Image (cartoon, grey):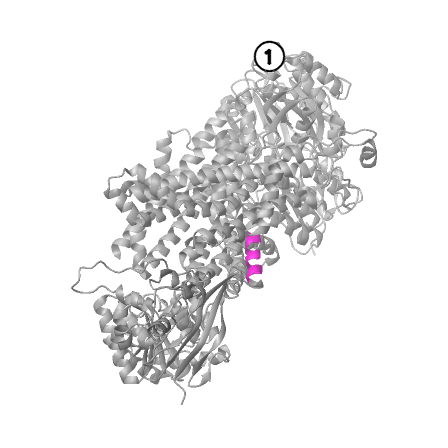
Amino acid sequence: MPPLLRVDDLRAYYFGFRGTRVVKAIDGVSFSLEAGETFGLVGESGCGKTSTCHAIVRLLPPSARIVSGRIELEGEDLLGKSQTEMRQIRGRRIATILQDPMASLDPLFSIYDQVAEPAYYHRAFRGRRLRQRVKELLSAVRIPSPERRMKDLPHQMSGGMRQRIVGAIALAGGPQVIIADEPTTNLDVTIQLQYLNLLKDLQRASGVALIFVTHNLGIVAKMCDKVGVMYAGKIVEMQSVRGLFYNPRHPYTRALLDSIPKLGTKDPLYVIPGQPPDLSRLPAGCSFQPRCQSAMERCRVEEPSEQHLDDAATTRCWLPLHEATTRG
Amino acid sequence: MATILGRATEIGGVSRAARRSYSWVREIPLVPLLLVTVLVLAAVLAPVLAPHSHLDPVKPTPGQCQAKYGMADCPYVDNMPPFWFSQGTFATPLGTDYLGRDLLSRLMYGARISLVVALTGTLFAGAIGTLLGVLAGYMGKWWDQIIMRVTDAWLTLPSLVFAILLSSVRGPGVWNIVLILALVFWSRYSRAVRGEVLALREREFVRLAEINGVGKLKIIRRHLIPNVMNTVMVLFSLQVGVAVIIEASLSFLGVGVPPPEPSWGLMMAQERESLMQGKWWLAVFPGICITMLVLSANMLGDWLRVRLDPQLRNR
Amino acid sequence: MRKYVLLRGFYSLVTLWLLVTIIFAMVRLTGDPVAMKGEIGADATYLERIKHDWGLDQPVYWQYTGFIGNLLKGDFGHSFEKSLPVRDIYFERLPNSLKLGFAAFVISLALGVPFGMLSALKVNTWWDNAGKMIALLGLSMPGFFVGLVLIIIFGVQLGWLPVLGKGSSAFVWSNPATWAPFWFRDWPHLAMPAFALGWYFSGAMLRITRSGMLDVLGSDYIKLVRLKGVPERMVVAKHALKNSLIPVLTFAGLNLLIMVNVAVVIEVIFNWPGVGQLLYDGLSNRDFPMVQGVVLMSGLMIVMLNFVIDVLYGYVDPRIRLSR
Amino acid sequence: MTRRTGIKELLALIAALALVAAAGEAAAQKGGQTPILSGPLVKLDIKEAQIETAKGKPKGTFRIAQHFALDPGWLDPLEHIFALTMQTYDYLVHDALIKPMPQGEATYSLAEHAELAADFRRAAFRLRPGLKFHDGQPLSTADVKWTYENYKGAHAKLFRDKLEHIQIVDDRTIVFHFKEPFLEFMDLYNGAVSGIGWIVPKHYYEKVGRDGFKAKPIGAGPYKFVSQQAGVQMDFEAWEEYWRRTPAAKTIVVKGIRDNAARLAGLQTGELDLAFGMTGKVLPQVMADKNLRWVPNFTSVWHLAFPGYNEPDSPFHDKRVRQAVSLAINREFLVRQETQGVGKVWGNWISPENRDALKGDGKDLPLPEHNIAKAKQVLAQTKFPNGFEFEWFVPFVPYFDMGERILTDLRAVGIRGKLQSLEGPAFRAKMGQGRKGFPGNRTIVQNIDPRPGGAKATIGVYAVCGSPASIVCEPQIEELWTKHEASKNLDERDRLNKAIQKILVEEYYMVPIYWNPFVHAIGPRVLPEGKGIERYYDTLHAPYPWPWEVWEVRADR
């Protein structure tokens, strides 16, 4: 039985400036996802999280190309599919929630139109049934008096409501996987929590798998089963949430954890030194090495390979290996 | 939002620093740059390069007089065709006009007028408009109300009509057209700049300067004007083309540059009849010159717009 | 919202008043129309009489208040040059201008919008470059150049199209029988001026469609529509088109007004009896009431359109209300 | 040259206007007309109208291109302007008591008989029987009276001031009584000069008012007004009941097209049948086109004037500078280029069509010379041995090309300036103010004036200190002019007049260039085909081919 979704050594590059510049936005990403599972994807802005999301549904901008790798949904190869076939997968089997609730609804169409679309195209719902379905979905995301509100236009709703509608749209096609790309970044903190709870509830009810992209480790702790930490287009560390917080393996993960403000201490906040890397001019060796406090000679020359550690954790760092050899 | 490139980086996540480090020189569109260079060189070096006077007829050879008029001697030979016609000569490569003046030389001197008029006119318009826009946006209140209402009224006046009107106040002349262009086009800058300043006013560095008691004039000079320059430059590059066309149209309608000074629009107007006689080159070459200049200005403007300010693409 | 509408309405009135005042002052700087009406050698009493007839013997402030007063009554005054009420002449010309304007408008849309969309959908391809080139060429060729070349090719050389005026069909306000046929006759007369005028504006339309379309296509909501698995043609035809047409239409509305009211050069070249030529005649004859009337009418239309746009936008997007 | 033959008739008219002390000659009036006035009369030379019997139905559409925007005001004789253009429209819709016709500068039209008392204090007319306006109402002496009393156009003040009262004898007979001798009455009352003789229907004008009349005029002329688009087009339809003859063309359409190239294009595409002012660059095209015919239609003489020359700071103050200007102009070549050799180099600035003008072909005044070497030599003696820069060269509108040609000729001797291409009205306005219209005293004007009323009228406008349009103001001329005005002796007047003309040319106050052909181009639809169109140009002193009712065109298909 293959995993629900498997991404294997995915590479996608942007070819900017008439092909003279290559930006390696995704550079060998692998992970897998089981039904009902929540996979968190964490990293700084611009590390390739969003590109990964778009690559999975094959909706990268025209200047980007998937160079190599595999994406499998229940064993089917998505990269081999035509755009028409992909369309049957988007919204129907893999749904997506975007960052900005204010911007992700078409301002000129009613809520009803927009929520109904996936059900219309993928589930062939029509007429009264479609209406019923939309009403159910809106109730599911806790929109009060859905019958009345679904005639409204997006600008008549608040931010939190809109994001819940986006959630309803994601559910409308009855997907197996929902990719949520920083769904709460633009929401107030109180509404964030409500929304996360809602997502959790919905996931529990429908058994859908969730890819949760965020830069907020707090949310990761609340939402996810498994976490991948991305840096410069690569997943530098992947393990369970518990493992990540208690036993981070990659110096970058550690740095991220250190930079979370902690209650009760007066220590100055930890800041990762240096700048996020320029993806078109990555340093030799490990991409993180210029900012890494434990960088060694080897890091500057050789790019770390994926290290499979115990408890199913993986990392791309020479450090565990080095520790093992020095200790041993 | 975003150019194609912008969208790519947004999703793919190229850092700002990375974007800035690209060599922008390589991205300048070559063709328009080349065209503009040629025209500018022709204009600047006209006295050196032009084969003949742009105001006096080319002295004909007796043979030409005999062939054209059956006269032994004549002051000039009009309407010589370009060199590729059988009667054409290389002495006047593009032929001569109705007064026997060399077309090529007149085109080169015409480039001077078009460029000088369009550039200085647009420059003055930009200066006035920017200043008023900054004042309106930053000083607010009555300044804003008065300046913006006048700007609105000004924008309602169609530019060419306004220009014709002004030209009948001022009479013909190169510098009068510069003045006219400045008076007509400042309003486009003040509108855009004001919007920009409204946003800038709320930014931290301006707030900070205000809190620290920096004078208003200094804030305008040090913080606001430098920050609206992108917008102004983009508008400038796009307005230059319009200015060239307005100058040509005014000259075409006979209220622009006074003859015998050669302006492209005027040359076209003067040779309208020749066009009907099949001497197309007399009107078509100046037309092509205008088109080339405006086209290059527009292309450079487009490029600059993408580079400097994606927000302005709709203007 | 009501306060906003009232404020915008007030601003529009102020703009109009300023426009009227600017134009009133400006035409009076252009010269003495009386001297222009009188022939060389006309005697002084004759000139005095004309001056009195035209009310120019009164002090300027009195002329101004009279002018404003008459405007409020809907009276634009008497044309100096054409000896008839400005209003009558203007409305006699208006249908011609509307005909030319609409035709040019349709051409500008027919050229600009599809090519603009194509150009945006096939960004950075051959289509895109061709589209951009058409747009830039349209913007870069002065109308009189295009007009002359058209006349030469289709009028004089090929002899396919008439080059003068609008043809024999006329729109007569007092005769409803002429109302409908006017729009459907004499299209050959219309072809060249409409094309010359339309091409210039099609450049602008193409640009605005392309950038509007690009903005929309790059927006999150289109991304979401695609992520829903909606077929691509529906993405374009339903969501992208509708959204990108809003700026296109507001801009097109303005263009239409410009084409109707101030197509001066094209109307002069093709001898089209429209409002633009009226304005040009008025300017060259220092026909104050005529210039004032025509500019005011075009200003009125533009201000009204802007007012409607402002109000609609303000209704759709509350943020605009604050920023303008 | 059909136009030339008429000059003799003109001379006859002068003679007619002379006082003839012939007390008993009133009875000698021909045609069995019973006299209206008692006492001695002036012998008037007014030609009989030529009434043509019906020549069948009017047919065809005749399309005329006016070379500037049309003014509905032209349709109202009561507001007649000082320009010949207006008669074009008078001749269509209206009719005058007497007016210029091919038969003579004064020809009976609505009137069949006129008398002028020898003391010039009474004038009488008898109208033709059975006259009507287009609406069928009769045209009576009441309309003549009303027109006179309500006339506001050119010379209106003069007519009003001189008038004592108007006596309506009966429906067809009217007598004007003047307070003092009104010598020019018959000249000015002629339809050529003012609008007062063109009769307006009282009943209709009073009903529709000034605006209404301009919007839709009614008259007694050969063509009924149909419709107009102000400034652009006027449509007229033949009025078959016109007393003189049935108009030949069924419809006349007049369009205002100011662009030469557009008029030519219109002729070539068959959208026009007659276009005015086709010299310059379009002329070779007109001549080369087998479908088109052209008529030279000589009008007046191009000349240069130097407004402000008499101020000492003007470069043209020095006679030698003006002489150099004249010497620098290559008139032969200019005529060749501008008019394809049709124009005539001429030595006087006043049109030879004027009965009292000196001939500029070498007879009375020498042909002007072109001599650059001499021009430079003359200039070398002045303050500007190497030439100078003046300010504006202002050509008559729209002869800008010609202006630039002359300007280029002047450059050859180092006299440089810029061309000011004004609009027609602006040019008129400047000229109307004389030298005050050209501040700075550094301007050359290139002018032409086809003015009726003889050389003295032209001199009286430009070369007399008192005229508002005065450009030349010289004590020497002023003295002669005062004598001229005071003189009652025709010979003396003629001598003084010619002396002034001589001074103006010899002192280079006016620099004549050439006698201008105001070429009309005619399309293929105008009959007769081929040769013979000159017959439309028989009316004297007319830049336009009046009357219109004789123009025949092919029937519309």
In the rendering, at what x and y percent does residue A241 appear?
28, 76
- Given residues A132 and A305, the one toward you in this image is A305
Quadrant in the rendering for residue D541: top right
Q: Quadrant of the N terminus of chain D?
A: top right
Q: Residue A136: x, y in percent?
A: 28, 82
Which residue range is magenta in the image? C128-138
Q: Is residue A177 magenta?
A: no
Task: Choose top left, top right, bottom left or bottom right for residue D244.
Answer: top right
Any magenta on residue C136? yes
Q: Is B90 placed above or below C164 here?
A: above
Height in image: A274 above or below D421?
below
Indicate whether B151 appears above or below D444: below
Q: Nearer the viewer, residue D227 or A109?
A: A109
**Residue tagged 1:** D474
Q: Residue furthest left?
A: A264
- In the rendered image, residue D287, in percent from the top left (x then y), is placed at 76, 41
- The residue located at (66%, 33%) in the rendering is B48
Task: Tell which of D395 and B74 is nearer to you.
Answer: B74
From the viewer's side, name the closer residue of C286 and A81: A81
Q: Main secondary structure of the magenta part?
A: helix
